[in-house]
Image (cartoon, grey):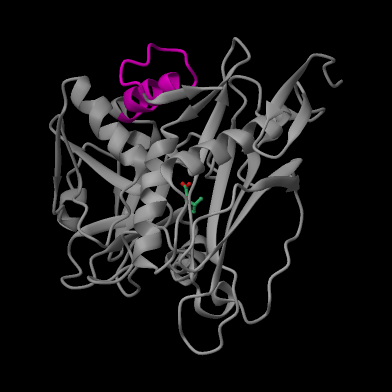
Amino acid sequence: MVSKSRCEAVGATSKIEVAELADFNWDNLGFELVQTDYMYIAKCSQNGTFSEGELQPFGPIELNPSSAVLNYGQGIFEGLKAYRKDTGSILLFRPEENALRIMMGAERMCMPSPTVEQFVNAVKLTVLANKRWVPPTGKGSLYIRPLLMGSGVVLGLAPAPEYTFLIFVSPVGNYFKEGLAPINLIVENDFHRATPGGTGGIKTIGNYASVLKAQSIAKANGYSDVLYLDSVHKKYLEEVSSCNVFVLKDKVISTPAIKGTILPGITRKSIIDVARSQGFQVEERLVSVDELLDADEVFCTGTAVVVSPVGSITYLGKRVQYGNGGVGVVSQQLYSALTSLQMGLSNDEMGWTVEL
Ligand code: COI
């Protein structure tokens, strides 16, 4: 039953009445698109600034077959989440960090980007317009997907003459089909996700298409996902297809340092700070694949995966298991600390949440 209580999303160009909660079964959310009400669209010419933008009903967009994003992959994306507090208000988690990261990615991909203010305002506008799709507390979150793409026409290889900044949202639950249970990873020895000097350190769409092959082979063999090694030495951990990786040994938490081939995850950065605030020593450095063999715990972090415990890793045919199949104590502790903050259940001393 849709609640009668109403709130307003007041946008730059729109004033929309939004019901409190969508009439939807919130109990079985996974990580699949649930069509929501509105998307945000702004346009910009190659050397210009983005228009104010507007909300439109969610649906297909028109793209010229010769657009730069379709032909040459000139596109980047972001991911962030909104949670419904038990008081009913909505919390965004560090949206200005996504704004800064999309600017960095846009620079690498020869694209203009929205300013931090434009980005954050557009996110707020889109979330408020789709407020009824933010799941009830404890049932999931609203995943926010900003896209920046070369929508203008090119035939020869060149930056597009026009760009589209679009945001859509979907309520989501757990990313992996395992839910919160530990995932099983395989270390990839032949395919690489990124190379030095390439685009591994930004969220360009091509980084994700290029891992589909390794990922689908891994899934066909019963693994949850793939852990990639550096492409030069085939020795150091990089990241998993959709998230960063952490290794715990003797109370020291280590994660691969950001060096251009690894995505600077916002959850990664947040977990480093949360872990340090809880007294852990955290090292950002080269982490050798051999360190997986005697680690106490391994876990992944990302906006979509949050903090995902790893139950086993297989490397060159050898399988190492962590924590007898259960969730590691430290992984659980960091997961709880982060999600309590994101859901407004603990005091936000870091000032990371933005209340709508
Ligand atoms: C995210 O965690 O937000 C991502 O962009 C990863 C994606 C593959 C779901």
State the image coordinates of residue 230 (x, y, percent, origin top left). Answer: 23, 66
Quadrant, the C terminus: top right
Above/below status of 219 relative to 256: below
State the image coordinates of residue 156 (x, y, percent, origin top left). Answer: 50, 90
Q: Verify whether residue 291 appears in magenta.
A: no
Above/below status of 331 relative to 290: above
Left/right placement of residue 159 relative to residue 132 reads left
Identified at 53% across, 41% down, the residue is 178
Identified at 37% across, 49% down, the residue is 101
Closer to the camera in the image, 259 or 185:
259
Above/below status of 245 relative to 351: below
Closer to the camera in the image, 11 or 207:
11
Left/right placement of residue 277 relative to residue 340 reads left
State the image coordinates of residue 228 (x, y, percent, origin top left). Answer: 31, 62
Q: Residue furthest bottom?
A: 156
Q: Verify whether residue 332 appears in magenta.
A: yes
State the image coordinates of residue 211 (x, y, percent, origin top left). Answer: 44, 67
Identified at 68% across, 29% down, the residue is 10
The residue segment tinted magenta is 331-351
